[in-house]
Image: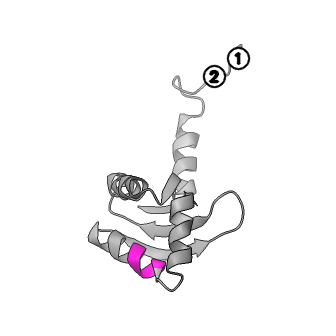
């Protein structure tokens, strides 16, 4: 599965950058993901609501969730959101097959 993770650093996590600004976080995170059976495609530090964005792939959601648990347990981040990539054509085909069927969703009062 392909995924995007959005993360927010804690004060302690940001303090680590100040203590060692030359540490290659991309290499550290990439190695952790490979050890878990995944692969990091990219890592960005960003401005805005989230401090970091990771784009990668893993064999399943449980692998990404386990990585999330490890990162949160480190105390460096306090918010990680996992967004799983989806196949819009496959979703559209399933929705089209449901249209008009007895199991199709009906809005209240509809």
**Residue 33: which quarter of the image?**
bottom left
Residue furthest front in the image: 19
Return the x and y of residue 9 as percentages of the image width and height. Answer: 56, 60
| Residue 88 within the segment the image draws in magenta | no
Crowding at dot 2, Cα within 10 Å, few <14 / some 14-19 / many 20+, comes out as few
- At 51% from the left and 61% from the top, the residue drawn is 12
How would you classify the magenta stretch by its main secondary structure? helix
Q: Which residues are magenta?
A: 25-29
Residue furthest top in the image: 109
Going by the image, does 13 lie left or right of 66?
right
Q: Are marks 1 and 2 in contact (CB under 8 Å)?
A: yes
- At 45% from the left and 69% from the top, the residue drawn is 56
Going by the image, does 100 lie left or right of 70?
right
**Residue 35: which quarter of the image?**
bottom left
**Could you tell me if residue 82 is visible in this image?**
no
> Residue 39 or 79: which is nearer the viewer?
79
**Residue 36: which quarter of the image?**
bottom left
- At 39% from the left and 58% from the top, the residue drawn is 74
- At 32% from the left and 73% from the top, the residue drawn is 34
Q: Would you name the residue on which mark 2 appears?
A: 106
Return the x and y of residue 17 as percentages of the image width and height. Answer: 54, 74
Crowding at dot 1, Cα within 10 Å, few <14 / some 14-19 / many 20+, comes out as few
């Amino acid at each position: 599965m392909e995924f995007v993770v959005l993360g927010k650093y804690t004060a302690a996590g940001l303090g680590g950058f100040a203590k060692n600004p030359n540490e290659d976080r991309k290499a550290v995170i990439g190695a952790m993901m490979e050890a878990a059976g995944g692969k990091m495609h990219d890592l960005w530090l960003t401005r805005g609501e989230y401090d970091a964005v990771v784009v990668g792939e893993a064999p399943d959601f449980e692998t990404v969730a386990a990585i999330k648990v490890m990162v949160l347990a480190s105390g460096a981040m306090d918010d990680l959101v996992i967004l799983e990539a989806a196949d819009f054509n496959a979703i559209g085909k399933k929705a089209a097959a449901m249209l008009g069927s007895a199991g199709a969703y009906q809005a209240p009062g509809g």
